[in-house]
Amino acid sequence: MKRIASAVVLTTVAALAVVAAPAVSQPKVVKIGDLGSKVGVFEGYGKYQTMGIQMAVEELNAKGGVLGHRIEILSEDDETKPAPAVRKAEKLILQDDVKLLVGVVSSGATMAVMDVTKKHKTIHWNSVSCAEFMRTTKFHKYYFSNQPDSRMQANGLAKYIVDKMGKRVYIFYTDYAMGQSDGRQFKTALEKLGGEVVGVAGAPLDTKDFSPWFGAINQAAPEVLFLAFAGTDSLRLMTQLHSFGMTRKYKLAGIDCFLLQQDLPSIAEPMEGFVQLNHFSAYNPDKSMQAFNAKFRKRFGVDANIAAGAYDAVHFWAAAVEKATSFDPDRVAEAHEGMCREETHIGRQCIRKEDHQVVMDMHLYQVKGGKNIPIARIAGTDSIGEPMVGRDPVEGFSWEIKKKN
Amino acid sequence: MSRVVTWRVLVAFVALAALPALPGIPTYYLLLAFDALLFGAIAMSLDLLMGYTGLVSFGHAAFYGLGAYATAILLERGVLSLWACLGGALVVVGVYAAIVGYFATARRGIYFALLTLIFAEVVYTFFRYTQTFGGSDGIQGLPDAHLWRGVPIDTPQRKYYLVLVYLAVAYAICRVVVTSHFGRVLVAIRENEDRARFLGYRVQRYKMAACMISALLTGLAGAIYPMRAAFATPDLMLWTESGEFIISVMIGGLGTLVGPILGGAFFTILRDKVSSFVDWYFIVIGVVLVLIVLFMPKGLLGIRRLHGFRQWRQGA
């Protein structure tokens, strides 16, 4: 039992050391948190999110920071899981006192982190996650998003698919918040437009072998295969679909974060002809997009991608802080509402007051030779839909397949 | 327990209870302390099985996760009573542990480890695929539990005291178990199972009982977790979580009870600090574990037995 005394001493010393360590802080510095996947299935998105934030902060600091404070970034890895994401969000907010949290990547983790940012009244920008709950049932006044959510994407994609690709669609999605949300919204939008969903299936996040689902897809004989996956899941899925000859058999379409532009050259053949909605492509001749890409390329030596959203998020926040002349979260949140930024990579972006969703245009792209080539532009006002804060986006929805004669 | 022992336990408890009263202690460190003590308590529960009975469980995450889901399901449905959550967890984990224990304790060594792992993977997969329980995203956005009507466990201080009380109770139970005749039989089984059987002990019953106590204590820890994190996800049941519990026991020192508490706390704090600096923090933890196994086979608690320390202490 002498061990107990030792245990107490060790624990107390450790606690005191931990408490004493962060006591010193720099004057005139404001910290912001970058929380994203640095390893795992969504690693690419997290790394580019960091780059986007970094570029924005460098620009702001070069102009004197925000409210005379130099901005400092603290990056943390959420491991693409809710538990580490919450732990790290708490660390960034409670220990590091960040005034802005950008992240995270996985929708499931973002929703868990939203509880933390709501509880601790911290401005929270999401630039990658797209589950529909974030601007409906999980919405809170400190949360903002410039990532087109599932409803916006579905509204944008469904019409093109019905008009140009085919009416018989099979929906295959990753079975967690993001994929389910994309699948639901796409099914709803497609059926409204007269399309027919001939089958739906969900595969768990980080599935290694997708072939068990291929039989059902082939049996349903769709014209179009709609895929709601992201990250390394998409890479594996496309490789396997291709090896089963299904990339040539069906027309393929997918969500905006299906694969990053950087991934496409290595998987160009399976992805040939793939249609996806996106708000950025380095191969879009649009002047604003090229200007942003040139800036990004000069700084990091690589093309930008949808992580451009993180760059805009930091600029929105900085502008809101300047407008509020304070870091007070309530005042900064109010200052965000209705704010617009001109000449971003996608032109004008405005924050809708009701659900803090950024209204922005998107493009439909088709992969040709490993490049996302624009085929249509969709106005943000056409795709955003009505605000649904507090309303259950799943209410009345059914995965049931409605057979058409 | 002797008077001296009781006094020391009280000192330890009072010291930890005083932590929130430290001037200027940041809220984050109270939450970190919660995690550290909870992890320590789970490692201690596992030590009962690993250190005292000689059974390595690779499936403790399932007990932990089931406890967490029991609480999450009740809180989500508006049952806010702490006692109902703990009771629910005891029932759910108890039933599962009885099934796992019945089959797993019939086997020894690697077969016991494999059976616990397989059962845990089945449970993990079930929760990951079942949309009723939120699938991969689990159950999120849970309200605070209430100690009793009108007394929510809503502040970091209250949550900290909740886990501290749980740790104290769990420690007392484990200490009583290992110092009893029952505990000595467990050690006998660990040392030589055949001889224990030859002496007339019904070995499987003892192993089963140890398994149940360990599982229920781990399940209670799991039941407390959503009261702090406000969610329960299938990741809590993943085999890597079981691996972290085992690592904590190894770091702290097998068969010591206090050692795994230290090991769990050390692991939690190390993970928190290192992961803020490097993405590959598990390599650092791996190196620490290798060093401990090589140079401190008795774990952190064995640090006092390092060369010269005892002599120095005696000389002082």
Image (tube, grey):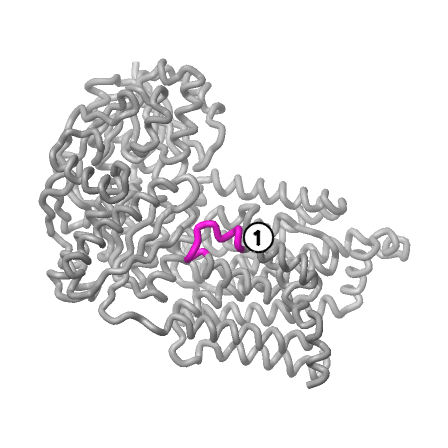
What's the residue at 34%, 16% (across, down)?
A: A250
Q: Is residue A97 above or below residue A37?
A: below
Residue occupying the far bottom of the picture: B316
Q: Quadrant of residue A266?
A: top left
Whether residue A45 appears in this view of the structure is: yes
Q: Which residues are magenta?
A: B275-284
Residue beneath label 1, please? B286
The image shows residue A283, relative to residue B232, as above or below, that is above
Horizontal and vertical percent for residue B116?
65, 46
* A25 in relation to B67, above or below: below
Which quadrant would the N terminus of chain A be assigned to in this image?
bottom right
Secondary structure at numbered mark 1: helix
Q: Residue at x 68, y 86 (%)?
A: B316
Q: Position of residue B11 (x, y in %)?
A: 59, 81
Please state, as top left, top right, bottom left or bottom right, where the C terminus of chain A lies in the image: top left
Q: For the point 26% across and 28% down, which residue is it?
A: A276
Q: Is residue A367 left or right of residue B152?
A: left
